[in-house]
Image (cartoon, coloured by chain):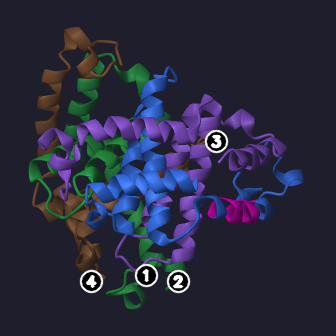
Chain colours: A green, B brown, C blue, D purple
């Protein structure tokens, strides 16, 4: 992950794009790319794997840049959140259900 | 990254949630969580770091699940996309500009 | 509004696109187009008015189709929601503040 | 539509919220609310009609505010865009197909 972050950040630095990458702009970018990813599934499930891979890569790319900009470790925040989610969704109550925690 | 994927997938498996995680549903989930992340920046730049970390973690979490579901390596698809993007945005033409490639 | 709805629905009917317009697919389409609208503001505020108009039109178009599909009047649901929002954000408590109701 | 716009704008003015409603912030708000609308369909098609109506109302509400801010007529921009879309998707080529115009 660190290695990937280094490459992604380097790509940005080479192009002097850091000036555009405020946390807010990166959050917008993640939403924009998430929309393009969703477009692969707009009308049905017959998605084009190559397109999905590219759009997913764009989302992850901006997630890495935002984590770097905030000075947080992507892996650590996911683990921290999983711990919180585990409390909201204990295995015995949530097993096999897609119900939101406030309706469980 | 592999270690993180293992934990994220295990979390899902324990709750028998895999049945809900079609690629399409995961793409929707990424968009939904990206919207919640964007909400941290809705009216201004004074974001709450803890909230941003949690929402970003949710986006990354679903990205990992989608990559796993598609059988692709998150790191590899980002590297592959960077190679493609490098061609669209050569350093000498794109340096210091936020212009989209089709208007460069 | 009714007149606009008629034209939008007619456009779809002529193309036999109603079969793709499940409420879920229309909700996805609204998100996708909202992302394209947001892209007009990705890196700065210097937006292209013509592009913004087109992307905003796409969002409204799918909103009209979804309202029609659900059998609800777009105007009425906005008025109903405003009444609810007015209770969450009474003028005296919310005036001049962008604070979310649960933190007011 | 004009009547609805008047009420929506009045609601905002009473609360002195116009200061937060830059075109960019309204575009973000449309994306955020579109995400909440999509959440009604996250895992399956069994949506709650009341929730969908409220979230759709939120999207339309911000669309009206953005159109007003830009000084454009929501109805007119939809009609203008339909004319453009009709050229991209002529009835005889697009009938019964969800194919994107660049692949038709």
Disc 1: which residue:
A99
Of the 4 image quadrants, the one containing the C terminus of chain B is: top left
Q: Which segment is the magenta one? A: C77-85
Tag 1's secondary structure?
loop
Using the numbered discs, state the Cα–Cα distance from disc 4 to disc 1 in whole angstroms.
13 Å
Discs 1/3, front: 3
Q: Mark 1 Cα within 10 Å, few/some/many (few <14, many 20+)?
A: few
Q: Contact (CB < 8 A) between labels 4 and 1?
A: no
Q: Mark 1 lies on which chain?
A: A
Tag 2's secondary structure?
helix
Q: Which of B78 and C58 is in front in this view?
A: C58
Q: Contact (CB < 8 A) between labels 3 and 4?
A: no
Disc 3: which residue:
D65
The answer as to whether the residues below labels 2 and 3 share one chain is no
Check residue A103 in the rendering and tell me which mark sits there, or answer none: 2
C49 w.r.t. A30: above or below = above
Using the numbered discs, state the Cα–Cα distance from disc 1 to disc 3 in whole angstroms.
34 Å
């Amino acid at each position: 992950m660190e290695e990937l972050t280094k490459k992604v950040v380097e790509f940005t630095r080479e192009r002097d794009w850091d000036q555009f990458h405020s946390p807010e702009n990166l959050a917008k970018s993640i939403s924009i790319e998430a929309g393009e990813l969703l477009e692969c599934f707009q009308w049905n499930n017959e998605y084009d794997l190559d397109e999905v891979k590219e759009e997913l890569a764009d989302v992850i790319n901006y997630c890495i840049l935002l984590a770097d900009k905030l000075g947080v470790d992507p892996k650590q925040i996911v683990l921290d959140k999983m711990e919180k989610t585990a409390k909201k969704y204990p295995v015995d109550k949530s097993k096999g259900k897609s119900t939101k925690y406030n309706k469980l």
